[in-house]
Amino acid sequence: MTRNDPRAPVLVEDPSVAFSCAPQRPALRHLGRASLRTSRSGTRRRALGRAPRVLLLVPSYTRVVEPSPQGSSFRALGLDTFEVMKRAGTPIGLLRIAANARLAGFDVRIVDSPFAGWEQERRHVDLGNGSSLVRYGLDDDQLRSLIEEFDPDVVGVQCIYTVQWGNARALADLVKDIDPGIVTITGGAHPSGDWRYAVPDSPFDHVVINEADQTFTAPLRALTEEGGDIDAVPGIAYRRADGAVIRTSAASPYMRILPKRQGLDQRLGMMPLPDFGMLDMRQYEQGYHSSGRRVRDHGSWAQIFSTIGCNVGCDFCYIPMVNGPWRALGTDWFDLHLAEIRKHGVTEVLIEDDHLLHDPLYAMEVCKLLRKHDLPWVEEGGLSLFNLVLLHLGEKFADGMDEAERRNPNFRNVLAAMRAGLTCRDLIKAMADGGCYSVYLAVESANEDSLVESGKPRLNAFQQATGDVVEMFTEYGIQVTGGFMLGFVNPPERPGGEPYIESLEQIEKTVDYAVTLMGRGMAYANPFIVTPLPGTKMWDFQKDYVVRHYDNGWSHEKATMATEKWSAEDIERARLDLLVRANGADKVVEMVRRGTWPVDA
């Protein structure tokens, strides 16, 4: 194999951790040991004709609680405390990998720790200066009992948020306390993007990098079959005895799902239906989910998906890396998926597609199926505003676009839908007819430069057209939460050039944009702070500006970076100012009271 062959292994001889977790956390007890290359208990179980046991865990989560910044809009409202919101949902990633592992003959159990102990909140780590990490979910004694009772051979821990990395690695340490012979594996967005440091920075034996639906089953087999070879598994990383990190291949495999060429059985073989019976669905019966108030007062809600992946390639987003390119699973697959979740008492859903509107005509069919199964729904993955704006502006605008922009592959399906006669109003009406009652609209910025410099289409900054789109949604009874991003820091176009750093004046324009859209009928303006995410195109550049560790700087509600143009505190005050100016005092106070977005259908 040549040096650049993606099948070749990758060696990191001297990995170092730039910023990990709060120094106030207890030191881990099981760092630095060579990764286990086999599961002795799993191999023994298999030899006795029994299924090896795999326990999949979402770690209990933490959030920052601290004094509100002096001089901020929160202080003016009498809100002396700032609290990062609780964030968790049905673990669809674990359900996906569990389905394949079960088909491969493993005994699999899932524990969603945050929701299993949702009301259990306690101060966990004192960060100093009146700040602390508050933990919610199962405590260590409860987790220990669950692990000891199941007696697993392999424990997999999900880590989709960098801000929860400290909790994932602490859970791996707890597992090794119980039995050092249990093989520990992690995966998800954070360890996929930060695998060089996640391996030496934790007691995990292995990191599964990027899409794990099929990859996860391969190391399970290698670990529990006699003569299994972990080095033959593509797309994983582990620790050698000398501390070096090995990635078994430079590339990670993604599923090739092509509904037009593959029958339903073939696609089900790659992506089996997630079994929601593996979860205690009573945990998801609250009157609120992360996007606001539910419309049904019975049954549970669940996060689901009709497509996976995204092709847009925004420099600040890890989805194209972790989840791969956009792929439709097929309306026949989705039809079965909806029928299956209804059997488990699900009465409404949150669509978590990374790019639902990549193909607007396909999205129309998705809406029909949601109506068929009587499932009111929220779009939470983030609707691509630029597609809606292009549909709204129509063919005359499209014909006048610069040729390079018009040829953007992200517009291909939108232009095809437009030629077929679809309008923005048609699409929004179809969503409403299909039971949609709330959407998360990825507006992001008022500044075309901020968007274009980060690989995002400029159409998001077309304020008149965006206001028209918001009005259409509200006309059809769909509440709109607008998502905004503050504090872009982008690499220079050429080596040695000046970086792009969004100014405070530009950020003020985005604040004004949010206020304007609230006047056009938007239900809630939700500002996030641009945050360096491991594995994104921005990561290697933005991490030089980082001023905080993972625990208190990676929530998107706290500022991670500081530049010569602004401090982290400046950006945090701008975020709070947007919240109050756009939403008004009453909604902000209600948001703090609920701990979720104050959006009611």
Image (spheres, rainbow, N blue to C red):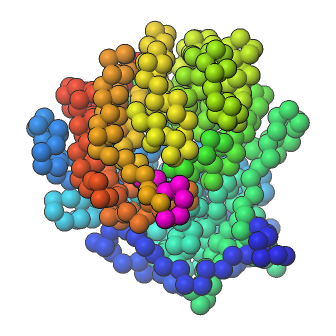
- Name the spot of residue 25 as percent of width and height, x first: 32, 71
Farthest top residue in view: 475
Residue 568 against residue 271 in the figure, above or below: below
Q: Residue at x 75, y 44 (%)?
A: 271
Q: Quadrant of residue 463?
A: top left
Magenta stretch secondary structure, dominant: loop
**Can I make out residue 292 in this image?**
yes
Image quadrant containing the N terminus:
bottom right
- Name the spot of residue 332 as percent of width and height, x first: 78, 28
Q: Is residue 80 magenta?
A: no
Which range is magenta? 489-496
Residue 63 against residue 14 in the figure, above or below: above
Q: Residue at x 56, y 44 (%)?
A: 455
- Name the spot of residue 125 as percent of width and height, x first: 27, 65
Q: Residue at x 73, y 39 (%)?
A: 327
Residue 60 against residue 37 in the figure, above or below: above
Work out whether residue 225 or residue 201 is closer to the camera in this orientation and state it: 201
- Residue 52 as seen in the image, left or right of residue 377: right
